[in-house]
Image (cartoon, rainbow, N blue to C red):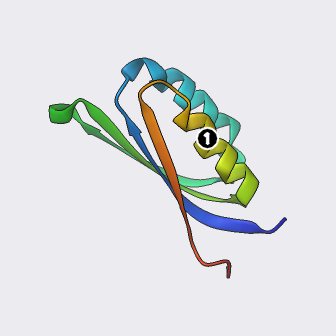
Amino acid sequence: MDDRIAMVSIIVENGESVARLNELLHEYSDYIIGRMGIPYREAGLNLISIAACAPVDKINALTGNLGRLPGVSAKAVYAPSKK
């Protein structure tokens, strides 16, 4: 399966999920190009962007696993299929 470039946007509302979130990102680290995290203390949120290059099923698995964590939302946006 061909690799795709994607951005995964993550919103963390539950700080107790951060340890497992970081474990998941480590599990998928071979596919992660870069990561940016922004703590938004006033709103009690953490905003995280992940740039990834991986097969679609891997990106979907990461996004799904993240979204199943309590207080975590995750969505992926894909670049056109040309690399």
Q: Is residue 55 visible?
A: no
Q: Is residue 28 left or right of residue 12?
A: right
Q: Is residue 4 above or below residue 37?
A: below
Q: Residue furthest bottom?
A: 82
**Quadrant of the rendered structure where residue 33 is?**
bottom right
Say what secondary structure mark 1 lies in.
helix
Residue 78 rendering spot, x and y as whole percentages:
57, 67
| Residue found 44% across the figure and 33% down from its top | 72
| Residue found 51% across the figure and 22% down from its top | 19
Q: Residue furthest left?
A: 42
Q: Is residue 28 left or right of residue 14?
A: right
Residue 20 rendering spot, x and y as whole percentages:
56, 24
Total residue callouts: 1
Task: Please name the amino acid that badge 1 sits on.
Answer: Gly
Q: Is residue 55 left or right of residue 43?
A: right
Q: Is residue 65 visible?
A: yes
Q: Is residue 47 left or right of residue 1?
A: left
Most foreground residue, 11 or 83: 11
**Quadrant of the rendered structure where residue 10 is?**
top left
Most foreground residue, 48 or 69: 69
Q: Residue furthest top?
A: 16
How many residues crowd around disc 1 within 10 Å: few (fewer than 14), some, or many (20 or more)? Answer: some
**Quadrant of the rendered structure where residue 25 is?**
top right
* Location of the C terminus (image quadrant): bottom right
User: Circle 1 is placed at which residue position?
Assistant: 64
Q: Is residue 78 above or below residue 15?
A: below
* Location of the N terminus (image quadrant): bottom right
| Residue found 58% across the figure and 63% down from its top | 6
Q: Is residue 12 above or below residue 53?
A: above
Residue 9 rendering spot, x and y as whole percentages:
45, 51
